[in-house]
Amino acid sequence: MTDALNATPQQKSEILMQALPHMLRYDDAMVVVKYGGHAMGDEDKARDFAKDMVLLEQAGINPVVVHGGGPQIGSMLKKLGIESQFSGGLRVTDKPTIEIVEMVLAGLINKSIVGSINAEGGRAIGLCGKDGNMVVARKVHRAHVAGEDVVDLGFVGEPDKVDMTVLEQILGRELIPVLAPVAAGADGQTYNVNADTFAGAIAGALGAKRLLFLTDVPGVLDKNKNLIKELKVDDIRGLIADGTITGGMIPKVETCIYALERGVEGVVILDGQIPHAVLIELLTDQGSGTLITR
Ligand SMILES: Nc1ncnc2c1ncn2[C@@H]1O[C@H](COP(=O)(O)OP(=O)(O)O)[C@@H](O)[C@H]1O
Ligand SMILES: CC(=O)N[C@@H](CCC(=O)OP(=O)(O)O)C(=O)O
């Protein structure tokens, strides 16, 4: 699959025959792809990701991209002399920080992904939670984090209401939505929403067939750092309790549980740095990461 885009016509038709049964499984289905800031990498990787989204759309699978950009926000804040502070995996977001978060996520990164998809022959449309009131956020009140001081996270939000009207207009019309995890509260205040949580809310509201988390590790690893290929929701709670799953993986697996409970059929956590990771996952028998089901 890695070389498929540069293959000869004969090789391409062989690859297509192998991919066909998988394509039929996902025909007209919705797949939410969470593209993490760590998975973004260099220009070549961005191009590969964009090619995958275009190919999925052409194959009749409707990809919805939700992107992050944590490391990129961190670099911009650093350039401006603003220190990043996290509590429980969430960025403490004061007034100057929320302005940079919105600029980097809904501006720079969103438009860069839209541009890459368009350059590969797709038609992407970049939105954030504010557009069409897609996601209305409420402030996160998570002051108590085990082992950490009590912190007011500031303008950190979580999805409160999700309205799919705008996305429903877009899907099935050869457009690829690219969503930045920025949303307004009912009072109009802008909130910074963790991209995993945002992706889970969108996947749940759409009843997506798959939610893919592209990150910088092969999937969920066990205590010996070996990949766990399949997990059930009930296994997850034990792995958090015994300290196998920690840090940034916790909001990810918690989002998996949330999305599965809302009808998403399966969630996969996989290494987005592998070229064409999404195509390998969806269109081959190889399945590259951790598949989580109910
Ligand atoms: N059991 C585990 N398996 C894999 N990664 C884990 C595990 N526990 C903690 N992690 C950490 O979670 C990180 C992925 O979360 P995060 O950095 O938030 O990703 P992203 O930026 O892609 O959203 C991994 O790089 C790893 O350091
Ligand atoms: C509240 C909060 O922490 N928001 C995140 C939003 C971006 C994000 O989640 O990006 P990744 O997926 O690349 O980590 C942040 O400010 O970094």
Image (tube, helix red, strand yellow):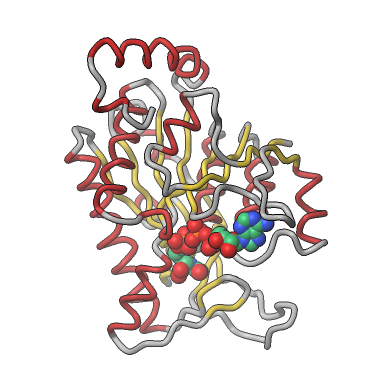
Please tell me which residue is depicted at 55% across the width and 48% down the height of the picture.
218
Above or below 282: residue 204 = below
Please tell me which residue is depicted at 60% across the width and 78% down the height of the picture.
87
Q: In the image, residue 239 lies at what x, y percent?
A: 78, 55
In this image, 228 relative to 234: left or right? left
Please tell me which residue is depicted at 57% across the width and 45% down the height of the picture.
269
In this image, 257 relative to 17: left or right? right
Q: In the image, residue 227 lies at what x, y percent?
A: 65, 46
Q: Does any portion of residue 51 appear in the rendered image?
A: yes
Above or below 104: residue 166 = above
Q: In the image, residue 84 lies at what x, y percent?
A: 45, 82
Above or below 36: residue 270 = above
Please tell me which residue is depicted at 69% across the width and 36% down the height of the picture.
293
Question: Which corner quadrant of the image does residue 243 belong to?
Answer: bottom right
Q: In the image, residue 240 lies at what x, y percent?
A: 76, 59
* Image quarter hosting the N terminus: top left
In this image, 252 relative to 2: left or right? right
